Image (spheres, helix red, strand yellow):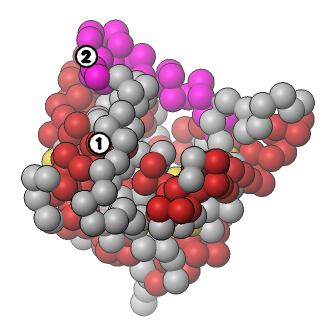
Amino acid sequence: MTQKPATPERGEGEKTDPENPFLSTREQAEGQTVVGQQRNRLWWETKPMTYADWEAEERLPRSSEELTAIENQIIVQSPFMRNRLDWSQFDGLDVLDIGCGSGALATRIAKQGASVTAVDLTQTAVDLTHENAKVQKLDVDVIRCDVEKLPIESDKFDFVFSWGVLHHTETFENALKEVNRVLKPSGRSLIMVYYRNSIVYYLHGFYWLIFKGYMFRGYTINGVQDLYTDGYFHRYFSAKEMGACIEAAGLKPTRFSVTQYEKKILPGIPKWLDTYLKKKFGMCLVAEFEKPVTS
């Protein structure tokens, strides 16, 4: 069984640090609705995924140039996307990008010759992706919807792509079932989620629990993630747990990879050790799988 989405473990009436962007955004969402996915949407409408600093009050690109530059920013920061992901594989495919954010990866896939549909829970992401595709003169179909209830016909896509998104939905298992439904038989998928067996998970967790004293306020290693992890919901998976979820959704795992972004996983270590640790204990788990052909 995988972890449930992290939920607040604060005492009744306990106030949190208003300067913590994750907790303050969570509390704003909680003050407006009791419905999980609506809280999720409000969190991301407030903190849209544009790769700006989380503390920044203005997260939206100020120009078309800034908007389209996000793609290069992502690739530069990601050794996996730069060195290990074969972008040419998308040529000629019908591709679904789940959680399109600024549209940076949907447009990159479209430039490879794919027919791309991009979906996101928020209107902000839909608007940004529309603008990004328009500026680059690309044809990307963009839909605002909940990944757990995709308004898309079954057996439509050759490939489903999602980078750092599905661990943020309320019920991950339902999202994977929808991925299965919209994939064609023999269709493939690549998704990235947060990796629980990572150095970052435990170092950050123990820092907040022990050195910042949150263990004395009733937090656990899972719940403390609320203090520094983006999104209203966030889940971390081991490869075994992810594989079990994929199989339970009727899909077949084909490969798991571990990676991290460009910044060193630990300060001061040599590059060879940094590369090794990121491949073994990085913060990102990349799962590749396919939809079996049934008789």
**What distance separates the C-alpha of mark 2 from that of mark 1?**
34 Å
Residue under numbered circle 2: 135
Q: Which residues are magenta?
A: 57-80
Earlier along the polypeptide chain: callout 2 or callout 1? 1
Q: Main secondary structure of the magenta part?
A: helix
Residue at image coords 14%, 53%: 31
Secondary structure under tag 1 reads: helix
Secondary structure under tag 2 reads: helix
Q: Quadrant of residue 256?
A: bottom right
Query: Could you tell me residue 48's position as x and y percent?
Result: 29, 35
Query: Could you tell me residue 55's position as x and y percent?
Result: 38, 27
Relative side of 157 to 240, left or right: left
Marks 2 and 1: which is nearer the front?
Answer: 1
Query: Could you tell me residue 278's position as x and y percent?
Result: 74, 45
Q: Does residue 123 lie above or below 202 as drawn?
A: above
Type of residue at label 1?
Ser
Residue under numbered circle 1: 24
Residue at image coords 51%, 22%: 73
Relative side of 134 to 161, left or right: left
Query: Front-most of 50 and 182?
Result: 50
Type of residue at label 2?
Val
Relative side of 11 to 74, left or right: left
Residue at image coords 52%, 56%: 214
